[in-house]
Image (cartoon, coloured by chain):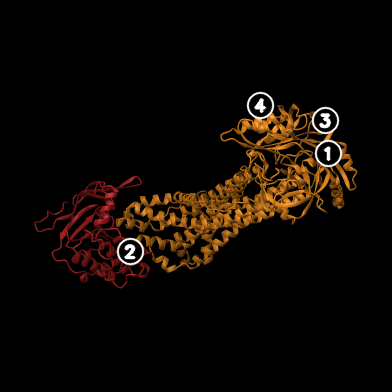
Chain colours: A orange, B red
Amino acid sequence: MVRALERKLLRDLWQMKGQVLTVALVVACGITAFVGMRSTYASLERSRATYYAHYRFGDVFAHLRRAPDAVAPRLEALPGVARVYTRVVDYVRIPFEGDPQPPVATLVTLPPDGVAPLNDLRLERGRLPEAGRPGEALLLRSFAERHGLGPGDTLPVVIKGVRHVLRIVGLANAPEFIYPIQPGSLTFDEERAAVLWMERAAIAPALDMEGAFNDVVVRLAPDASGAAVIAALDRVLEPYGSLGAVDRSRQLSDYALSGELEQLRSFATSTPLIFLTVSAFLLNVVLGRLVQLQRGQIATLKAVGYADLEIGLHYLAFVSVVVLLGTALGVALGVWFGRALTGLYGEIFHLPVLAYRLQPGIVAVSALASLAAAAVGALASAWRVVRLPPAEAMQPPAPAVYRPLLVERLGLQRLVPQAWRMVIRELERRPLRTVLSIFAIAIATGTVVLGRFAEDSVSYLLDLQFGVAAREQLDVAFTDPLPERAARELAHLPGVLRVEGMRSVPVRMAADARHRDVVLLGYAEGAELRRVLDQRGRVVPLETDGVVLTTKLAEILRVAPGDSVAVRVLEGERRQVRLPVTGLVDEMFGLQGHLRLAALNRLLQEDPTISGAQLRIEPAREPDVRRRLGLLPRVASVTSQAAERRHIERQMAEAQMVRMVVITCFAAAITVGVVYNNARIAVSMRSRELATLRVLGFSRAEVSQILLGELGMQVLLAILPGMVLGHWLTWLVTSSIDPERYRWPVVIGPASYAFATIVVLVAGTLSALLVRRHLDRLDLIGVLKTRE
Amino acid sequence: MSAAPALARDPPAVLSARALTKIYRMGEVDVHALRGVDFELRRGELLVLLGPSGSGKSTLLNILGGLDVPTAGTVRYGEVDLSGADERTLTQYRREHVGFVFQFYNLIPSLTARENVALVTDIVPRPFAAEDVLALVGLGDRLDHFPAQLSGGEQQRVAIARAVAKNPALLLCDEPTGALDFQTGRLVLATLERVNHELGTTTAVITHNAPIARLADRVVTLADGRIAREERNARPVRAEEIAW
């Protein structure tokens, strides 16, 4: 049987349905974000773990120049190593007919039976290559699908300068290529990221790797120390040109995937926090109003014998229903969002076992979190309920205390019209509520700003990267370091206007016990195309000797200009030298050291040598230049800066559209939640006053002005702090991104600030219009007759 | 001034107060609402507390009803000392033994007449049926009306029904006709009279309206926080006969 008090609860909820709904929507936004992202994170992580386990993804990886097979047993014998798998991994070009920018494929060898003991692949279509049938290969499925290739098709490749034609016998995916970033590329591009698998015996001669390997995958023994095994591997493999073994966290694909997952997880926590904070505030306001309106009812309930606890729980039940409604809606939307998001990630990563599953724990946590927010919001009101003496039932509430305004106290009241005096007094009378309302609307503004930041930052970054730092049109990477005259030879190609050679070399940089594997970049004398730039786009000069470090790298190594770092070259003779640090540069990507080409060549004790070149060309002749470059055997890859930029922009635009719509809806929900609730409360608390004004002859518009003026003022006051908050939220989000990969500049364009302002103003106006209906229907006589 | 000594034929006291003092602190001044009041409420009687506003009658009623506690003095209900009681005891006392009727009815606007009564019958042992008490106050045909659909007099009678439904030992009414016109007020008084006669509920009515005192078995007049006069009404008149 429904008790009378429960009936009251239901009728109160129905009576305040507009407010119940708007607050529930704010809660729902937070829960949607939480459930959607959190369940996606959990689903992805579970899928990844299953995938890794099923296809025996290794624990430690090492790449080297060349080691004879006889070295393998020595690795097997190292303490802590459970299993070792050696193979050959190399890069080959796929010279598609008419493709000015041929993709570079990672070629991975397979054992005779096609089943790798570690880092196995997942055959998606077709069959494995058969031993003794040269030219058979598996192709990465995403690449094959993008290019309409399948089993039975042929594929041209250039291996060590020699053209081969491979027959595709199957399509595959692999745990080590979930996120296959191509050498020289900033992002994962399905159209260009290719992986080929071939039987080792069939391809080793072409790779000049008979009886040798250049890639090691290790499975650790249970309880083995990864660091110890890495150190031991490095000791054994160093003479064979190892670049240094890494664990999973530094394996390229896993590193990128983990970064994505980590970002998702951090968003899954920070976004709901914003919404739950706002909903706590709204519940505080709504319940505070309810308690104030029902002051007499509460006292009556106490007088007729209801205990404080029963009445307190009655009002807590009110907010619980609101948040549980929001939570239910949020969970439903969150599951939908999570499914969509998981699907989206699935498309990007091709995780084969990708299954979306909503963990009951996530629902429980979201319900608890929203209830906790509700409890925080309701606490003050519930306390007022408990403290209200029952004798109050006998008394009408005391009139609210108003104070003369600051301007009035200063004697300037003539400057403020009567109606605005009422508005400002109302704001002044409840300073905390006013400040909190402004804060909540500022959060909405900031949320929109945050939603737009990625676009602004990326376009800033791209302008800087492609417009100022890299002013070449084509970027050429060589298969091996070449004498400097290679650059001059490129300059002779028709259509090429300028060529600058560049040398890059992997090194391990250390200071005391701290070290990082980074790249040293050598710039040609008088280089104009590639220069060292800081975050603001200023050119950083290079000294004759010494190295300029990425600020983040100097931070990690704890060195400053004037100090020196130990550098061990990870190729060739593997020389070890000390380099003075001459300067720092605040860069946005990666960790590196910059120095003059001559200095780098000196350090490597080599003749003037380059490993790549930047080309400025006649734009009209670009296809021709690319075609000619594609024919050069020592050219590993040609990257068009414009194509790279377009690709990044296209990728961003797709993601950005979805994000914008979602974030704008979220911000609108907050603004409507705050403005509508404040307005409804103001109407109900002050209906008597407003009706009196109408009776005295004020027009509807004048009465609306008093009420809506107050709300408009809150919205206007919120916009500027909202922008500041947006800037801060953006900073917060960017600082959650792995600083060793990216250091996003917080760049927010005027258009974003304008957009945020418009979203909040429109949402505020809509809420005001909703409330305006209530104002227009004010029952003049009825209101004056009822006792407050 | 002390209460008249109980005569042998007087019913026993249900509630007795001794030397009640209530001081409110308003800013920097002490307001003496009650200055040493001795008072008894006897089983089954209909008592009227008369006095101008500010005389302390509401304060006295609040203390008698367990809505407030005295600054000094004692209030006893049977074996229970209410003057030193904690909130729990006072809630229990109000819940099981006292019915209140307020000047402004204090109905819950979101609940119908029947549900307003059910609010009380839900939480007490052995209540009357809501329908029965509403019939008793003459609202048997208005069970499912919301307060906004009822006249002031009808609302007050719902309030009386709500107070009576728990079958209280005491019915305390604070200016029950204060917000009503004369005709309607008389109807409400008749209802109180009926409850007192038919159910034998000990009833105390506060009013500043002297003619209403003719209804009472006993009239206590308060002035300036003290009992100024106490009279026994040998022949109470019926509500219909009263005019003001």
N-term-proximal mark, 3 vs 4 = 4
Seen from the viewer's position, the closer of residues A39 and A281 is A39
Q: Indicate the chain on which mark 1 is placed.
A: A
Q: Which residue is mark 3?
A: A606
Q: Are marks 2 and 3 on the same chain?
A: no
Q: CA distance from mark 4 to mark 1?
A: 33 Å
Q: CA distance from mark 4 to mark 2?
A: 80 Å
The reply to whether residue A404 is in sight is no
Q: Are marks 1 and 2 on the same chain?
A: no
Q: Are marks 1 and 2 in contact (CB under 8 Å)?
A: no
> What type is the residue that disc 4 sits on?
Asp
Quadrant of the image for the C terminus of chain A? bottom left
Seen from the viewer's position, the closer of residues A772 and A373 is A373
Q: Secondary structure at mark 2?
A: helix
N-term-proximal mark, 3 vs 1 = 1
> What type is the residue that disc 1 sits on?
Gly
Q: Which residue is mark 2?
A: B116
Quadrant of the image for the N terminus of chain A? bottom left
Q: Which residue is mark 4?
A: A512
N-term-proximal mark, 4 vs 1 = 1
Q: Name the disc covering residue A270, or none.
A: none
Describe residue B6's horizontal placement relative to residue B194 as left or right.
Answer: left
Residue ranking furthest to the front: A132
